[in-house]
Image (cartoon, rainbow, N blue to C red):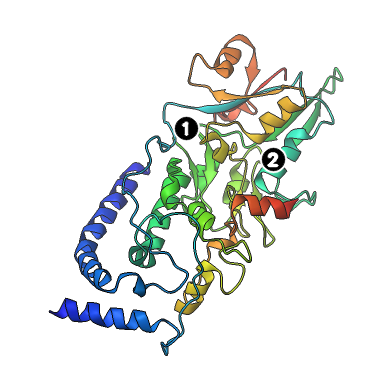
Amino acid sequence: MKSVLAALLFALAGSAGWAADRVPRPALGAARGEQCVAEPAFMRRNHMDLLKHQRDETVHRGVRDPRASLKGCIDCHASAETGSVAAAKTDFCVSCHSYAAVKVDCFECHASKPAGKTMAIAR
Amino acid sequence: MNTGDTEARNDDASGAREALAGRRAFLGIAAAGAGGALLAPGIHLIEVAQAAAPAGAAQGANPKVRWGLLIDTTKCASGCNECVTACQTENGLGTGTSPTDPQWIRKVEIKEIKTGRTASLPVMCQHCAEPPCVDVCPTGASFKRADGIVLVDRHICIGCRYCMMACPYKARSFVHEPLADQKPDVPRGKGCVESCTLCVHRVDRGGQPACVEACAKAGHHAMLFGDLNDPASEIAQRVRQVATTQLRADLAVDPGVRYAGL
């Protein structure tokens, strides 16, 4: 019974849309690609663990599984305007991280743009 | 050395996934009620991807392999800088020449005083079997991969530069300045030590280091990359036939980079 009630509440909140919400929401643009590596609810909570696990696998063991690689995330989630996930406040990573007040250090070393775009700028 | 750690982490991950299953079942019911309306406009309802990794995904560094380089100094042209330029382009290093600018590969001109014979050769990280940089690293950031490539894990490096002191080949650099527009394959940042990676991102895809390709493209063919452990590989055959030396062999660090004609 409780879960049905929760579902009903969710549906009501959903149909009202974010705009009617008193709490400001991070602006997440549409992603390229058909589907993410896991469902969005899981990714929102666990993307950092997936990335950290993959980071050690790749750096130390040379396992370059594109499934949970930062490069893979950037390829799909780079914004159409800036071509980056972290250049503007509305870009995918930064919008959520500034909303949650969690500092994202990745892009002090990692490129925040997919390969093609970075090369175009370098030229 | 990392296998144990990684397995432990795998277990953690699967444990966490099981714990999440209950919560996910609830979310599933909620989502079934609310449908797509839960999502903000502009976001697709994204399906769960197949859990299995794609077949043929990289198995990682092979411990049976020992990657190495053979540099034929008789073919290396004095004044040619193609390998250095290729390295800078591939890895997004600057072209600066100040003493504090990062440099992963450099050209060295040597001369035997008594005879006047000169030779030109590139020197980079020698990818030692017994790397002194790994011995001295206080955090474990400096490490040797299973296939013999010596790397710095910048996530762990604290920039103490002890490895730079320990390296007999002056192969490592420290990044002093903030960087921008790094290559997606080569993350780099201020405050870390770095050095030649043998273009590990290319090697893992089955390619060759950028310097080797550039040398061949320039028509010198002075650099040969390959698996020293595989008796059938070209590099293993060449080091069997031709007299080659390791730089500072007296230090017994057993470099993976060998030089012919020195």
- Which residue is depicted at the point 57% across and 37% down? B202
- Which residue is depicted at the point 85% across and 17% down? B115
Few, some or many residues within 10 Å of mark 2 (<14, 14–19, 20+):
many
**Residue A22 x %, y %:** 42, 90
Please tell me whether mark 2 sits on a helix, a strand or a loop.
helix
Pointer 1 indicates a residue of which chain? B
**Residue B172 x %, y %:** 64, 45
Pointer 2 indicates a residue of which chain? B
Q: Is residue A80 above or below residue B255?
A: below
Taking B176 as reference, is B32 left or right?
Answer: left
Taking B256 as reference, is A53 left or right?
Answer: left
Most extreme residue toward the bottom is: A22
Q: Which residue is mark 1?
A: B147
Most extreme residue toward the left is: A1
Residue B53: which disc?
none
**Residue A112 x %, y %:** 58, 60
| Label 2 and label 1 in one chain | yes
Residue B87: which disc?
2
